[in-house]
Amino acid sequence: MSELQELYRRVSVCSDCDLCQKRTHAVPGEGPENAEVMFIGEAPGFYEDQQARPFVGPAGRFLDELIASTGLRREQVYITNVVKCRPPENRDPLPSEIESCRNYLQRQIELIKPKVIVTLGRYSLAWFFPKDSIGKVHGQIRVKDGLCVLPMYHPAAALHAASMRQVIQEDFQKLPDVLAKASQAPAQTEPREPVAEQMRLF
Ligand code: URA
């Protein structure tokens, strides 16, 4: 079993916060272990909780379209969320829930080593840059601990406000260029103590 699969197993039985009580399935994430691009959303919704897969509902269909518009295929990229279990009624995740899940996402980033991380929505942006506002930084590269982060609005924003659709589509058009540039950059050395040490899980 790879470390990533072992992490999935741990997420599937995790009881570190109360979200475990109402979930049907935890949703660890999916995609190749050598993916160059990692998309990070907020938390699973109804369909994700049913299927144990990220972004398979209406927002996921738009995300698939956006990914395809960049010339990438969904099977090529890694997709996960800040929080791995569905908050009841799709409410916003609590700070304590985000912290409970933090080490899982941190370890996924360490194992996959994506060249570009696309944050989808404000929770995912805040995971890296708590002080930034999505309205100001969407579509602009940010660097954190040697990671190239491209903040985007959440695809669900376009489902709630049609005017957002074009903004999101335009931001996604920047991804191929950002990926090409990030691929030219020399590989980053481990930015800090890998989280496996802190978790003492692996
Ligand atoms: N919204 C998210 O943030 N993540 C999902 O997996 C689905 C919808």
Image: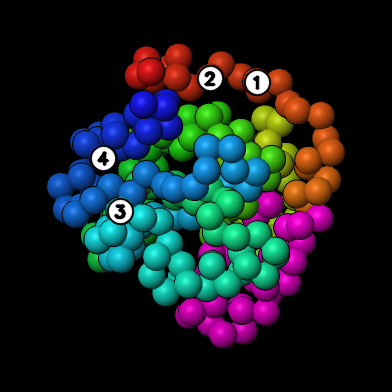
Indicate the amino acid at tag 4: Ser
* Mark 4 or 1, closer to the camera: 4
Category of crowding for the residue at label 3, using alpha-carbon neighbours closer than 10 angstroms: few (below 14), some (14–19), many (at least 20): many
Q: Where's residue 18, x and y in %?
A: 20, 44
The residue carrying mark 2 is 194
Helix, strand or loop at disc 4? helix
Indicate the amino acid at tag 3: Ala
3D distance between C-alphas at marks 2 and 3: 27 Å
Indicate the amino acid at tag 1: Glu
Residue 131 seen in render: no
Q: Is residue 151 magenta?
A: yes
- Is label 4 in contact with label 3 (beta carbons under 8 Å)? yes
3D distance between C-alphas at marks 4 and 1: 27 Å
Q: Where's residue 129, x and y in %?
A: 61, 44
- Is label 2 in contact with label 4 (beta carbons under 8 Å)? no
Label ID, residue 190 = 1
Q: Which residues are magenta?
A: 149-177
Q: Place residue 45 in its image quadrant.
A: bottom left
Give whichever of discs 2 and 4 has the lower sequence position.
4
The residue carrying mark 4 is 12
Label ID, residue 52 = 3
3D distance between C-alphas at marks 2 and 4: 22 Å
Q: Place residue 136 in its image quadrant.
A: bottom right
- Residue at 78% x, 51% y: name it: 178
Indicate the amino acid at tag 2: Pro
